[in-house]
Amino acid sequence: MIECFWVPKISKMSEKSMKSSRMLLCLITIAMSLLILSSVVMLQSTTLSSIPSSVFRQIIVNRTALFNSNGDRPNTQTSLVSPIGTEGPKLRENVSVCHGANVVKRVTVNIGEKTKRLCGPNQGELKVYMYDLPSEFHFGLLGWKGKSNQIWPNVRNPDHIPPYPGGLNLQHSVEYWLTLDLLLSTTSGVSRPCTAVRVGNSSEADVIFVPFFSSLSYNRYSKLHGREKVSMNSMLQNKLVEFLTSRDEWKRCGGRNHVIVAHHPNSMLDARRKLGSAIFVLSDFGRYSVDVANLVKDIVAPYRHVVKSAVKSASFDDRPILAFFQGAIYRKDGGVIRQELYYLLKDEKDVHFTFGTVHGDGVSKAGEGMAASKFCLNIAGDTPSSNRLFDAIVSHCVPVIISDEIELPFEDVLDYSKFSIFVRGSDAVKKGSLLNLLRAISREEWTKMYERLKEVAQHFEYRYPSQPEDAVDMIWKAIARKISSVQLRSHREHRLYRS
């Protein structure tokens, strides 16, 4: 609306003059307004304009610049206009990215049909403080030597990361993957889940991670060499106990918020009782007393499978073998059941039950056999669990678990009965019992378990960088679920009783 202001009358001549002036001012104002409106219409209608109409409206109506003084885009999204006849990039949903301690920016990462999250130090669901232990406790055990005062390898470049040894060593490599994931969590420009993020101050952390490659230490350095009286494995454990128990972080709550990976059943033999208040990441509880390791405080993590993961797997009719087992047969303690089953099943035509090792082409042969079998037998050995279960899962071969004392990874969120068969050991060794059970399972029932197997297989894959819902991500989430019980115990100990 255009306003023409009223002026008090002074004289007849001046009144006429002022009326003419007011009229002229009004005409000029109207003409300028019409000119501006016509310019807006022309800019919006022309196809030659280099400014998209949505952006122009944002500048004119909202008076909002495309970039603020810091170079950041405003929160309001704008639609991108593509040239005629081409389809421009679609703006995906915003993803939080942290740059520094207190500055959060919103950016969009366009990678085809998937948007990957970029993590920063303020975003982790689980904030983890990791000790900068000397390399002799971790990558130094792999022969890695950094430059002067360099503790960690350059994780941004995979070529600079020492590889983990293969064979059966690989099945207990959990600590390797978790340590790499934490190191990568503070590396800019890397896409990974925001479940666990390393923080630089222990007082800000939910848990404290101890980067000791205990399984590797046992596998490679537990034997005495030359004139050694104490193995390198025992020496490292003793040094670790001395280090941890002297730290204020440990003393603050007795080590209950510390995470120690001891996945090999014989790892941490010298130190496990002294550090038993910590959260252990284990393969099972077979060689632990209940006061040192239990489900209340500890995590069961999957073995790293050694056979290749199935990309396309055969369905029911294309798997001629009913039941498959290949491995060590004569075992001690709970493993004697393998021997009994061997004599019951070895002559059955549709059953593959033989000795097997990882040497030669043993692993590839096992993978081929599992991929051609409807059911894969997971029988207790020297310990309740083995990597055979996870080899079966990634081969999409329905596991038959014959291990009464077994504890399974992520069982608080995964229902194994949807993709596995559980059989008591005492029932399995009854003549004809196991085969009758398996042969009674219909194609439809087996297919349901098979389809579920394909869905859950991702949870048992160790990847670098880690991916959402893979084994690394699932372990961090399992640790996060333990925090409430740690806090409960801490709070109960700090109760104040007043008379």
Image (cartoon, helix red, strand yellow):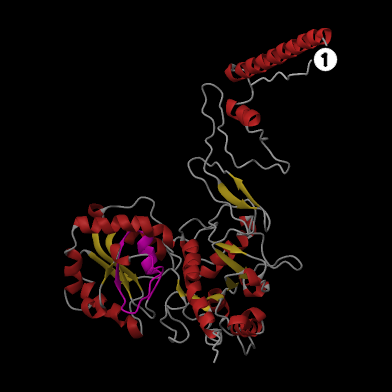
Quick one: quadrant of the N terminus?
A: top right
Quick one: quadrant of the C terminus?
A: bottom right
Q: Position of residue 19 (x, y in %)?
A: 76, 10
**Residue 262 visible in image:** no
Q: Position of residue 407 (x, y in %)?
A: 37, 75
Quarter assignment of residue 27: top right
Q: Check if residue 390 falls in the magenta segment.
A: yes
Mark 1 lies on a secondary structure that is loop
* Badge 1 amino acid: Ile
**Residue 125 visible in image:** yes
Q: Which residue is drawn at 35% across and 85% down?
A: 333
Circle 1 residue: 10
Left or right of 11 on screen, residue 49:
left
Q: In the rendered view, tell whether residue 95 sits above or below residue 153.
A: above
Q: Check if residue 496 falls in the magenta segment.
A: no
Q: Position of residue 496 (x, y in %)?
A: 56, 86
Residue extent of the magenta highlight: 385-413
> Foreground: 398 or 62?
62
Q: In the rendered view, tell whether residue 6 sits above or below residue 337.
A: above
- Seen from this angle, which residue lies furthest bottom? 499
Left or right of 370 on screen, residue 271:
right
Left or right of 337 on screen, residue 59:
right
Quarter assignment of residue 422: bottom left
Quarter assignment of residue 55: top right
Q: Which residue is drawn at 38% across and 64% down?
A: 391
> Foreground: 336 or 390?
390
Q: In the rendered view, tell whether residue 265 sits above or below residue 169.
A: below
Q: Position of residue 41 (x, y in %)?
A: 60, 17
Q: In the rendered view, tell whether residue 300 sits above or below residue 289.
A: above
Left or right of 92 on screen, residue 98:
right
Q: How many marks?
A: 1
Q: How crowded is mark 1: few (under 14 residues within 10 Å), some or many (20 or more)?
A: few
